Amino acid sequence: MPIWYFETGNPPFLENIDPASASTSVDVDTNISFYVVDAESGVDPSSIDAYVDGADAYKGTVGFIAPYNGPSSSFTYLPGGSADGYDAYAIVLDNTGLLPTDSIITTRVVAADNYGNVLDTDWTFTTWEGDPPFLENLDPFSGETGVALDKTISFYITDAFSGVRASTIDAYVEVCG
């Protein structure tokens, strides 16, 4: 054990985290974004790595990793862009269609400053896709009697929050009696 030791500087830190840590009811198509900031030597942009639920999403030496490389993904240098006027790197991860519903999502960011101080942090948020789709304009209506055997059956499937994916629709008709 050394007799005397000390550390120089502080590691980078995050600002403008969205979705915010511990937030709930987050739409599954919300992009994940954050700023990486360092108040002393500046952030080494090649050191920035981001992970979503353990999967690579961004690597500073490579860029965005599929499937987090969608059209809304961006990496932007913002001179003086932090809340306190420090230089920042803004990262947006396009995760449209990637996050599961009603799940706790962990985002982890690792970054170093130009002195070698390392940030390794994570935060979680919970997704929600809203109320499930529902049926409306049922024809024949539920419980109707005396319906002709050749009656055309029709209905609408609606989801006001995130829409309905046609590939997920299954309809069955059960004939009783």
Image (spheres, grey):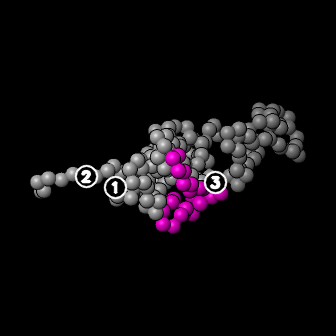
Point out which mark residue 7 bears.
2
Crowd tier of the residue under label 2, counting other residues whose Cα lies within 10 Å: few below 14, some 14–19, many 20 or above: few
Q: Are marks 1 and 2 in contact (CB under 8 Å)?
A: yes
Above or below, 155 relative to 61 = above
Please state which of the two labelled residues, at mark 2 or mark 3, is closer to the viewer: 2
Residue 105 part of the magenta segment:
no
Q: Are marks 1 and 3 in contact (CB under 8 Å)?
A: no
Q: Which residue is farthest bottom?
A: 62
- Residue toward you, 98 or 141: 98
Q: Which residue in the structure is indicated by mark 3?
A: 72
Instruction: Describe residue 54's horizontal placement relative to residue 146 as left or right.
Output: left
Can you see residue 106? no
Residue at image point 12% right, 56% down: 1
Q: Marks 1 and 2, how far apart in space? A: 9 Å
Badge 2 marks a residue whose secondary structure is loop
Of the two numbered discs 1 and 3 on the same chain, state the one appearing first in sequence: 3
Locate the C terminus by quadrant: top right
Q: Amino acid at mark 3?
A: Ser
Q: Amino acid at mark 2?
A: Glu
Rendering coords of residue 129 (x, y %)? 61, 42
Badge 3 marks a residue whose secondary structure is loop
Of the two numbered discs 2 and 3 on the same chain, state the one appearing first in sequence: 2
Q: Which residue in the structure is indicated by mark 1?
A: 117
The part of the chain drawn in magenta is 55-81
**Quarter holding residue 116:** bottom left
**Quarter holding residue 42:** bottom left
Q: Marks 1 and 3, how far apart in space? A: 30 Å
Q: Amino acid at mark 1?
A: Asn
- Residue toward you, 162 or 31: 31
Above or below, 71 relative to 153 = below
Above or below, 121 relative to 62 = above
